[in-house]
Image (cartoon, helix red, strand yellow):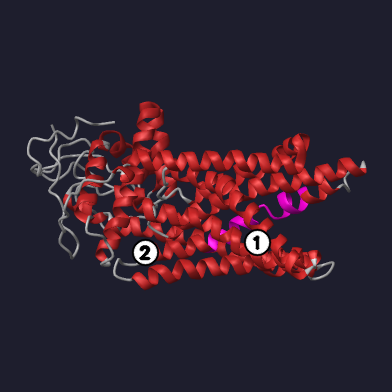
Amino acid sequence: MASSPPYPAHPGASSGGGTLRHAHWWQRPWVRYGALISLLTLSGLVILALVREQTGTEGFLVGLGLAVLPVPLLVAAFRWLDRVEPGPWRNLLFSFAWGACAAALIAIVANSFATQWIATATADPAGADTLGATVIAPVVEESAKAAAVLLVFLFRRRDFTGILDGVVIAGVTATGFAFTENILYLGTAFGTDQLTGDNGIASVTAATFFVRIVMSPFAHPLFTVLTGIGFGIAALSGEGQRLRRVLLPLGGLLLAMGMHALWNGSSTLGQYGFFAVYGAFMVPMFGVLTWLVVWTRQRELRTVRTELPAYAVAGWLTPAEPFALGSMRARRIARQYARRYGGKAAARAVAQYEAYATSLAFLRHRGRLGRAGTDFVTRERELLLELWHRRGAARPALDHAARVTAPAVPVAAAPWPVPGMYGPPPHGQPAHSHPPHGHPVHSRPPHAPLPYGHPYGAYDPNAHRS
């Protein structure tokens, strides 16, 4: 049995103890999960009935078939952004369900009530519709979508550690909201075409599909991502910076409302108002946010390469692993290698190893900056043991990936004779072949036991290997 290395210390802080308390019945996980599932299910059934009532059965089916087209692409794009430290699928499912059911129901009810109240108070239905679209709808809809980000931020704090987590949760929530809204708009447009008998390329359905699905499928995600960025920056703040942790999400929410109001108000700016806002604001903003999230992902990879060598020195990782774990290409090669020689189970173990190692790097980075919570030591120990359980499958794969992706180092031939170059090695030195250029040389094979005593008594790290 290979013993694990000594447990590294907190970088600059000591662990704090907590007092265990008995949770009340409403604080139990199954109660929370049951209440949440019931709420989303009830919201889904109500929103389904409302949309079907407004569009009709045939219009609902047409709208559903057309509205679902951009959903896989958007979800895949946000999942791709989250590849450095992928969050659990349950968070994405909750976010999408909240946007499609709860947030959409809140928006439909609140927008309709507010618009009718304004129309009654001002006796101006047209003005009420314009005011509702440009002022009421952005505030209501962005607040409803932000609720999902807030819930994940509060109750899934371990999964919400930075800007990319906020972007992904907010984007998937907005994708679900846009999905339901598109069903309503496309189904209503189809009903209009049925009444007028226009089913050609110039129909209302075709125009609505072009504007909402082709030109601006990213509109709602783009607005809500601003809220997610605010929550993501707040997640990077220390526990003592409470004002910052409150103001940043509120600032992101206000920006999301402003962009949403500008987008909705573009229809009132004349014949070409929509295209002017689209070209002058939406496309540049999309480009800036795309650059920001890609830059953030590269920054996270640099954090992995910077923080993990401390664990390699302690013996928890091999010297090549920080390099391999800090490269998306090396990670992919490691998973492919594991799948080729160990099957799906080995590939899954390597993927989990990569995710846990990334979480460990981010945790240590927060601890080094003084932003870690009081559970730093406990969480660090959990992550290290998760890595130790999966080292059998992960280390050979990551070692192979490091050799494949290591940059080639050009070596010029020495102009003078080198001892042993043209003959046997000097007396007492073993003969061995040199590795190819750029391949790291390890002083210890990946499966050799590490020369450290186990700090946790008779615990067998191989007993729970996945």
Q: Nearer the viewer, residue 169 or 305?
A: 169
Is residue 266 positioned above or below 354 on the image?
below
Residue 153 forms part of the magenta stretch: no
* Residue 399 makes an appearance in the image: yes
Q: Nearer the viewer, residue 210 or 126?
A: 126
Residue 119, percent across and down?
Answer: 75, 64
* Amino acid type at mark 1: Ala
Name the residue rendered at 51%, 62% in the picture: 227
Q: Secondary structure at mark 1?
A: helix
Residue 68, percent across and down?
Answer: 66, 40
Q: Secondary structure at mark 2?
A: loop
* Amino acid type at mark 2: Leu
Mark 2 lies on residue: 236
Badge 1 density bin: few <14, some 14–19, many ≥20, Cα 10 Å: many
Say whether disc 2 or disc 1 marks the residue closer to the N-terminus: 1
**Number of numbered discs:** 2
Residue 421, percent across and down?
Answer: 24, 47
Q: Nearer the viewer, mark 2 or mark 1?
A: 1
Whole-number angstrom distance, CA of label 2 to CA of label 1: 31 Å
**Labels 2 and 1 touching (C-beta < 8 A):** no
Mark 1 lies on residue: 137
Residue 254 numbered tag: none
On the rendered image, what quadrant is the N terminus found in? top left
**Which of the 4 image quadrants contains residue 452?**
top left
* Residue 199 makes an appearance in the image: no
Q: Give the residues drawn in magenta, as a range.
A: 209-226
Name the residue rendered at 76%, 69% in the picture: 276
Q: Is residue 89 left or right of residue 461?
A: right
**Which of the 4 image quadrants contains residue 165?**
bottom left
On the rendered image, what quadrant is the C terminus found in? top left
Is residue 396 positioned above or below 180 on the image?
above
